[in-house]
Image: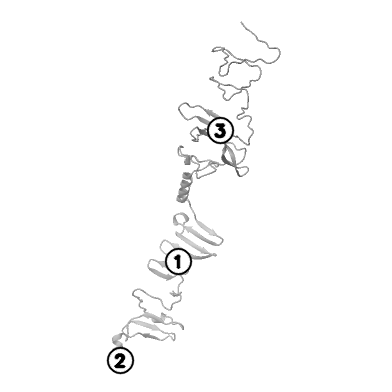
Amino acid sequence: MSKNLNVNTGNYTIRVAEGNTITLDTGATGTTTLTGNLTVQGTTTTVNSSDLSLKDNIIVLNDGETGSGVTLNTSGIRIDRGSQNDATLLFDEQTVHNDPASQTVRYGTWTFKDMSGSIRGILTNSIATGGGDLYLINSGSGVVNVSGTADYETNVTEDDDIPNKKYVDDAITTGIQTIQITSVARGNTAVNLFDDSLDGTVSAIRFTVDGNERVLIKNDSTEIENISLQDNLITTTASGADLTLSSNGSPFVKIDGLLKLPIQDDSSAVAYSPTHVAVYAKDPDKGKTGVWYKNKYDHEDELISTNRSLLYSMLF
């Protein structure tokens, strides 16, 4: 049987002695309906229910704040985790972040922590910035890490994928092992590589400076300017050209070892010079040394040995 209480004018107040309780008991399945607004005063409001449904699309926390920001520094939601540290989703006025739009450090940051202060993870598959930059870490010396994934570096296949250090290391190693460079050039100065198995020509490295070939390295020899080096042999590349050894700032050229001169069958082939003396080997004659010279007057003679010199001095 329903009963109605109508108060046609004025307010209706139910009051009990301070510290006591007013209970609206509808049983386990009943309903209490309020057709107007509900204002709850006090410091604590407790709702004991399995599910709470609200039609409001916005929940206002810290309502009535009059300060600049949250006076108590944080405002948010706390989740009871039983024997574990409670989880919180808080707006923290004292935590700073870098603002990509203004390029400044701003106070007031959303945080995901537990009551011990430990930062908690977020599970999501997309972060939108409204078209602006995305700043990560913002301070300290931390890094963006993908540990826990399976062979992340092998899954970086799309142009917009972000590589990790392992991907870069592998890419450099693979690139060095497989790269095929045939020429390095700047202007008309270049280094060119040739391989007989690929180019059908003699394997070589050619160095060109200002369009002129200066060094040619082949499998069995090296040519520098007009000098050819092959094993322990030094020759000129041009036939008939002299090979000159010259010291810088000293009148001497030192030879650490024995000097062997080949026997000249025909000394007429030894050209004389108006500025030099030619020294060469030929069959020994009266001087018994086999060491001959030709001076600037094209005069040829043999250097005399010590014994011959003593003999001639005694005779003459």
Q: Front-most of 281 and 109?
A: 109
The mark that comes first in sequence, 3 or 1, is 3
Choose mark 3 or mark 1, whichever is in front.
3
Identify the amino acid type marked 2.
Answer: Ser
Residue found 29% across the figure and 93% down from its top: 315
Please give the residue where the numbered disc 2 appears in the rendered image.
Answer: 313
Q: CA distance from mark 3 to mark 1?
A: 76 Å
Q: Secondary structure at mark 3?
A: strand
- Residue 189, relative to residue 157: is it above or below? below
Q: Front-most of 223 and 36?
A: 36
Mark 1 and 2 residues: CB-CB less than 8 Å, in contact? no
The mark that comes first in sequence, 1 or 2, is 1
In this rendering, position of residue 116 left or right of residue 9: left
- Residue 54, relative to residue 122: is it above or below? above
Residue 137 rendering spot, x and y as whole percentages = 53, 42
Residue found 48% across the figure and 46% down from its top: 168
The mark that comes first in sequence, 3 or 2, is 3
